[in-house]
Image (tube, grey):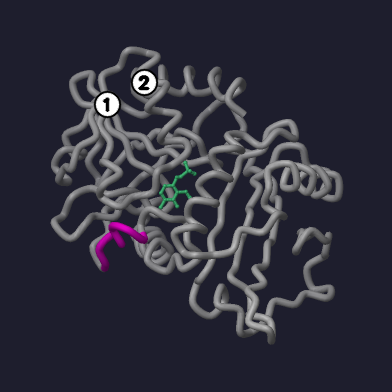
Amino acid sequence: MIYLRNGKIEVENEAFSLSPTDPGLLHGDGLFETVRVENRVPLFFAEHLKRLQESADFLSLPFPTLLSEPQVSDDLQRLLDETELSDAALRIVLTRGVETKGGEESPVVFMTVSPIPPELTGPELPILKLKTWRRCEHPGPPLGSHKFLGRLVYLLARKDVQREGADEAILLDRRGHLAEGSSFNLFWVKDGILFTPPLDMGILEGVTRSAVLLAASEESIPCQEVRSHLVAILGADEVFMTSSVREILPVSEVDEMKPRAGAPGPITRRLVKRYQSGKVCRT
Ligand SMILES: Cc1ncc(COP(=O)(O)O)c(C=O)c1O
């Protein structure tokens, strides 16, 4: 894999050096963003960089100038040239880095691009089966609101449910309320109303979640952000998930219960259409 480290193109296995004492590696002390790139244009770029900056402030992580929008934009174009990709998933990683002898922080920035899986670029949307996961609760506020590197809970959740034949996991809070997925925000529709868990549960304020809420208001679809128990989604007419690279994907099963209006249902289709036309002007 070709990647950028601190602004320099490098090739995997050649001259790779991340300090074994980097707190990003040792403790997950760092952040990341994943951005969908279409025709060399990073979608919702400003929103991703803003979230990264706000989370860096929260963790008191220095925010290097390498992460300014023009610099990341230039670096992305260099990476796309090197990899000959025009559609890609861009991953930006910021680790705290090892302090210099003089006690100065020296954060490390990585950028990688990888191809978007072909099933996520065709006209037919892949359809997912979800399973609730109960081994641990959702991290909740404040950590759950940030894309920090330490993602063991989310990783475990996905691996566990995949062993049981599902595609992705739904995490619950300690009271059993629906929180979010292992790497996505969750939506469902009941009687024409769109529902999603509220941000004060300490879930990630997904860039796609915000775009879908905007699409719903443009489509005059009523929407409620509510704390709900599992039963709400099990009796839903439609269920879908959102994330930057996968955008909006319909869900055909939650814990083996099927949404009544199928997958994708009519409201999901309207939102996908609105989102797809809106994202072009909101890059
Ligand atoms: C836990 C979690 N929730 C939600 C999302 C969706 O966020 P976004 O739409 O900004 O990609 C992600 C994306 O990686 C995630 O990891």
Q: Are there few (<14), some (14-19), or many (20+) residues within 10 Å of tag 1?
A: many
- Magenta region includes residue 142: yes
Tag 1 residue = 194
Quadrant, the C terminus: top right
The image position of residue 272, as x and y in percent, is: 46, 23
At horizontal 16% and vertical 42% (from top left) the residue drawn is 228
Position of residue 38 relative to residue 32, above or below, is above
At horizontal 58% and vertical 70% (from top left) the residue drawn is 96
- Which region shows up in magenta? 136-143
**Residue 211 marker:** none
Position of residue 34 relative to residue 258, above or below, is below
Residue 153 in the figure: left or right of residue 196: right
The image position of residue 109, as x and y in percent, is: 68, 62
Q: Amino acid at mark 1?
A: Leu
Residue 143 in the figure: left or right of residue 190: right
Q: Amino acid at mark 2?
A: Ala
At horizontal 40% and vertical 59% (from top left) the residue drawn is 158
The image position of residue 213, as x and y in percent, is: 37, 27
Tag 1 and tag 2, C-beta contact below 8 Å: yes
Place residue 174 in its image quadrant: bottom left
**Residue 216 marker:** 2
